[in-house]
């Protein structure tokens, strides 16, 4: 009985080792792995709503991860990878759009909104309680 129990545990251990998932994107260095993780978190899945391709299970996200993997293995730079994806899918694919004339208002809107909020707070809260000099 002890022999059967020992064989059982040895076989379970062997099966467990072989059943462990392998890395679907093997890289030659830790630096490339970190680049892959960073890039896949910066790229938006175009079929999912505000989800990056790293965490999406959509078939297109899987294809995009594969494409990013191949481009990293081909020693393409981050800029080249992003440029390729923007040409193919548009700037929407990037979570952080580039700063240019088309996205100027998008980048300045938080500051404009903050100034407008401060103006209205001053106008309606502070100026209302200040005695008039007239």
Image (cartoon, rainbow, N blue to C red):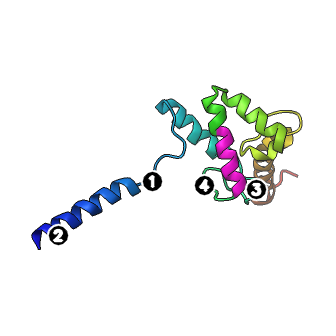
Q: Residue at 66% across / 51% down in the picture?
A: 62
Q: In front: 10, or 131?
A: 10
Question: Which residue is the site of mark 3?
Answer: 121
Residue 30 as seen in the image, left or right of residue 72:
left
- The disc, 2 or 3, on the residue closer to the chain's N-terminal end is 2
Q: CA distance from mark 2 to mark 3?
A: 75 Å
Which residue range is magenta in the image? Answer: 59-68
Question: Which residue is the site of mark 2?
Answer: 5
x then y, percent, for residue 110: 76, 47
- The disc, 4 or 3, on the residue closer to the chain's N-terminal end is 4
Q: CA distance from mark 1 to mark 3?
A: 56 Å
Circle 3 SS class? helix
Question: Which residue is the site of mark 1?
Answer: 21
Q: CA distance from mark 4 to mark 2?
A: 41 Å
Question: Which residue is the site of mark 4?
Answer: 55
Instruction: Give the numbered dot on residue 62.
Output: none
- The disc, 1 or 3, on the residue closer to the chain's N-terminal end is 1
Indicate yes or no whether the magenta region holds residue 77. Answer: no
Q: CA distance from mark 4 to mark 1?
A: 17 Å
């Amino acid at each position: 009985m002890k022999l059967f129990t020992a064989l059982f545990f040895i076989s379970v251990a062997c099966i467990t080792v072989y059943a462990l998932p392998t890395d679907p994107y093997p890289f030659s260095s830790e630096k490339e792995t970190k680049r892959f993780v960073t890039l896949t978190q910066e790229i938006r899945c175009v079929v999912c709503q505000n989800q990056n391709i790293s965490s999406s299970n959509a078939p297109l996200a899987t294809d995009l991860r594969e494409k990013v993997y191949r481009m990293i293995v081909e020693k393409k730079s981050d800029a080249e990878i992003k440029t390729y994806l923007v040409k193919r899918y548009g700037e929407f694919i990037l979570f952080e759009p580039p700063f240019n004339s088309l996205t100027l208002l998008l980048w300045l809107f938080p500051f404009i909104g903050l100034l407008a909020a401060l103006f209205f707070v001053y106008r309606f809260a502070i100026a209302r309680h200040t005695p008039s000099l007239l």
